[in-house]
């Protein structure tokens, strides 16, 4: 019987080629996953079987990754967690939240985005005890109809915090009059949203479509030929009513 001698170099090359072909085949049929893959695991059983699991979201995921998996627009994620967005919102990662001033009690971090996604999609998730949500996130959920008024009031008391101030705050900011927000000439639509007003509520008062989030209400009204002073008290009443748990 003829014997064949295989050199060490040929054997090593054969092993490398075989390994490469195995990986390539796995990638083609969808079984190969690298560590850079930002795809959360799916829920295996129950009424939400097959859906992506909010609990599987990692701090290294970007807003774009979350949008792809849970169909939450990056623009809304950026609005909900505006305090942490710098540069391109698509690349913002939940793990960056921890670098910002935190509330006196609790923390706004990766678990906050898991809770937000859960509330947005109605996929159950049990948040950690010290998890908190920015008022801006709760206001967006309310505005988009993801939570009703009763649930909003409950979540605001349980999880709501104001982000962006140097000291952080565990309660809603209040003015000297005790209001959650004192409306002034430089008050923006974004501040009304963060205080809990919906676009529909604001439009009911002012009679025109709201401006963009960063636009001062006074500037917008005057540009439309409306007198800010005629609507200031009415808007303040709405804000005060929200703080008391009204509509």
Image: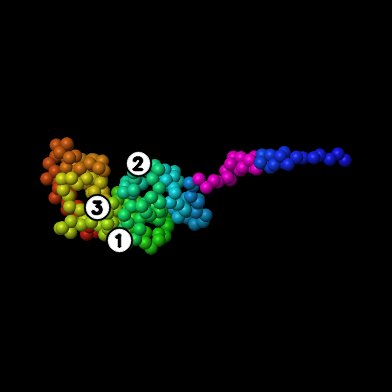
Q: Which of the pair 53/215 is nearer the observer?
A: 215
Nearest-to-viewer mark from 2 and 3? 2
Name which residue lies at 58% across and 45% down: 31
* Residue carrying label 2: 87
Q: Nearer the viewer, residue 101 or 28?
A: 101
Left or right for 211, reference 108: left
| Percent coordinates x, y for residue 223 in the rendering | 17, 36
> Disc 3 designates what residue?
195
Mark 2 and mark 1 in contact? Answer it, CB < 8 Å. no
Residue at 75%, 40% in the rendered image:
7
Which residue: 27% across, 54% down? 166
Magenta span = 18-36
Closer to viewer: mark 3 or mark 1? 1
Residue 237 seen in the figure: yes
Residue 68, position as x, y percentages in the image: 44, 43
Instruction: Tell me residue 23's x, y (percent).
Output: 61, 42
Residue under numbered circle 1: 104
Which corner quadrant holds the C terminus? bottom left
Residue lying furthest right in this view? 1
Residue beneath the point at 25% across and 57% down: 172
Q: Is residue 31 magenta?
A: yes
Q: Which of marks 3 and 1 is nearer the N terminus?
A: 1
Of the numbered discs 2 and 3, the one sitting upstream in the chain is 2
Mark closer to the chain start, 2 or 1: 2
């Amino acid at each position: 019987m003829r014997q064949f001698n295989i050199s060490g170099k040929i054997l090593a090359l054969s092993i490398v080629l075989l390994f490469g072909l195995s990986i390539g085949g796995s990638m083609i049929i969808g079984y190969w996953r690298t560590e850079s893959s930002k795809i959360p695991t799916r829920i295996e059983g129950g009424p939400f079987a097959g859906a992506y699991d909010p609990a599987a979201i990692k701090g290294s995921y970007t807003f774009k990754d979350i949008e792809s998996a849970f169909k939450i627009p990056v623009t809304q994620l950026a609005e909900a967690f505006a305090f942490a967005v710098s540069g391109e919102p698509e690349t913002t990662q939940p793990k960056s939240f921890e670098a910002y001033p935190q509330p006196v009690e609790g923390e706004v971090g990766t678990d906050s985005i898991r809770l937000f996604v859960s509330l947005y999609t109605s996929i159950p998730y049990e948040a950690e005890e010290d998890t908190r949500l920015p008022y801006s996130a709760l206001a967006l959920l309310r505005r988009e109809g993801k939570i009703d008024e009763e649930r909003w009031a409950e979540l605001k008391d349980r999880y709501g915090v104001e982000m962006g101030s140097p000291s952080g705050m565990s309660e809603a900011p209040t003015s000297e009059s005790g209001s959650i927000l004192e409306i002034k000439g430089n008050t923006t639509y974004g501040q009304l949203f963060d205080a809990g007003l919906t676009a529909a509520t604001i439009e009911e008062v002012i009679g025109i479509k709201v401006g963009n989030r960063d636009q001062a209400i006074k500037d917008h009204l005057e540009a439309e030929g409306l007198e800010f002073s005629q609507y200031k008290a009415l808007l303040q009443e709405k804000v005060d009513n929200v703080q008391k748990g009204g509509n």
